[in-house]
Image (tube, rainbow, N blue to C red):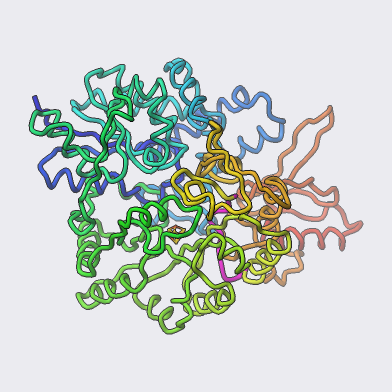
Amino acid sequence: MISDRDILLIFPPLTEARFFPYLSLPMLTSYLRKNGVSVVQEDLNIKLSQKLASYKSILEYRDIIISKLGDKSRIAIEIRRHMCDFMLSNYEAIYGYIFEKNEDKRNKHLKGYELDFVRKIIEMILEGSLLKKEFCSFDDIDNEVIKFNAFMINDISGREFLSDIKEIIKNGNYQIVGISVAFYSQVFPSLIAAKIIKSICPTVKIIFGGPQITLFHEKMINLKCIKKYIDYLGIGDGEETLLMLHKYLNGEEVYSNIPNIIDTSISKVKQKLHVSNLHINEKPILDFDGLPIRNYMSHGMQLGVISCAGCSWGRCTFCSYGNRSRSTRNYQQKRIGQIADEFEFLIGRYGIKRINFVDENTNIKLIMKAMKRLKERGYKAEFSIRCRLEDTFLDKELCFELKDLGCTQLSVGYETFSQRVLDIIDKGVTSANFQQIVDNIYDAELELRLNIIGGLPTETEEEAKESLHFLKKNENKLGIDVIQMLVAEPQSFLTEREETASVGLEIKKNSNILIGNKVINYGMGRMGYEIEYKEGANYEERKKWMMQILHQVKPALNTEIQKKNETTDSTGKYNTRLLPWVKCISVIEEEREITYIVNLLFEKIYLFPETLLLNNDNIEPKSSDNEEDAYQLLQQFIEIGLAEC
Ligand code: SF4
């Protein structure tokens, strides 16, 4: 019997993809609905984020901080407690603005940092959660999933996630559950979800798809938990896979016609895979209906779209996504009219003001033509693109035209300033042009945000310094979103074409250990094989070179970096008060009372100076002795963003 709700699609936690819906669900949903299949789409990642930032969760977390963080220092516990108090007392302003997009609720004293506060409290509550556990091999994940049971969940995040899963499954009657595993940090929560789903509804068919499955299916297929809880793995585009699987399960199709699928109950070598031929031009307009698009964590409502599949360049040796499309000669892009139609539809249906092209490498000229067409139809929306520091931007007029068409932001991969190394990784850009490109982008008032990769093959310390120097020199013109060490992903040229692409590296493809960017990236970021550098500095030394970027470059566009307030001309003598998120916290340490001054937003902590006195939120010299020194200190407080006049 076909149920009234045939397919449930889930985007699981934990990932930072919270600004707008990740596109896998809306893409699959639109295709399936167009073909008459009933679909429910659930973004459990944003649902969990919203729940964690709720008044109830913050209050609960505040009550259990001491028991939860028993091994932390007293000041660490107090900082968390003060953060909760700050969030609770500004709850309407922060939650209302971010999750309800209610501008009227904004409080100007928060100075536009609402998003940063929400992210901080969510990560605080997630601290130590089983959902956030980091794994360096699929074997470790397998063992943890097999031994997992719901009683092991003793934290707010895990409990909320499991209750969401149970509620959705119990309230529906699904034939297929598709789980989209876009990021490595979603693998473990996805498997837990599958285990719970199977325990409630053993007959439902579960299929995993998404970039992580495409990358790692050969490792995953052998896991006990995959064989036990997952019926199928989808590799590559999932639209036709899900439609045909649905037909097959209802006796309308033969299994062998389903593209991009692996049956986990059969050995992979015995399965003949064929690929989906669905072209991007045949894909319908994205369908976000059912997703809580107002609740995503961004300033104003935003959505994502794609204009192409694969990468027209496709040669950067570390990029499995681009390399796959080049190897299979399968780069595809939408038609100009198709992009304009999609924009027009999304603006009309969802009332959004900003759309982000989430292509890995957008064809700039294609987008400009599409945006011109949209403008001719009387529409305009802000948009962002992802691209390289390519020579297209040497054309200053083009940069201004891009801005005029609505472009506000460029996300760009930056690896090195050394042309020698750029050629080794086959990036296809010219470092001698970088300065002019950055200047043009800046002059056109386009926001330039970089994703930086360090630890490049054969890079010398001198070259790393030169690269750092370029970033430092331009820090007032850019933002940095991600910084990561080189990752040797399966299916990248780095791992598949070792003779030519992995010069200077030894890549340990036979090891089960996977390496990502622990601590630096959310959930370890992208994962790949271990890398050993054959000559010169080793991995750790190269990582130190890269970390210099974090220590030395202060990108003007990063809100999370505390800026020195150089514009103040205050002497600090008049009514100096702490900023709302700066707190004085006293704790007993080794039988002494110590008072700290803590910036909750930027996680900075200082000893409270003995020459100053806190009077409510005002801060002033303690006595007339050394008054000048005290005022100088107050001036410094203002400059480093602890206080204001
Ligand atoms: S890194 Fe970007 S430009 Fe290079 S192959 Fe990948 S998607 Fe294409």
Front residue of 373/181: it is: 181
Residue at point 71% right, 51% down?
A: 535
Q: Is residue 26 left or right of residue 616?
A: left
Front residue of 70/284: it is: 284
Is residue 95 highlighted in magenta? no
Vertically, is 300 above or below 231? Answer: below
Residue 518, percent from left and from top: 59, 40
Residue at point 66% right, 62% down?
A: 553
Pick out the residue farthest to the right: 625
User: Magenta stretch: dominant SS?
Assistant: strand
The part of the image, by quadrant, that contains residue 204 is: top left
Is residue 481 highlighted in magenta? yes
Q: Quadrant of the N terminus?
A: top left
Residue 90 shows in this picture = no
Residue 585, percent from left and from top: 71, 40
Quadrant for ligand 1 reads bottom left
Residue 469, percent from left and from top: 69, 67
Circle count: 0
Front residue of 548/310: it is: 310
Residue 380 shows in this picture = yes
Residue 577, percent from left and from top: 68, 56
Q: Is residue 101 left or right of residue 479?
A: left
In the rendered structure, which segment of residues is drawn in magenta? 475-485
Q: Quadrant of the C terminus?
A: bottom right
Residue at point 29% right, 72% down?
A: 371
Pick out the residue farthest to the front: 499
Vertically, is 51 above or below 202? Answer: below
Vertically, is 561 above or below 76? Answer: below
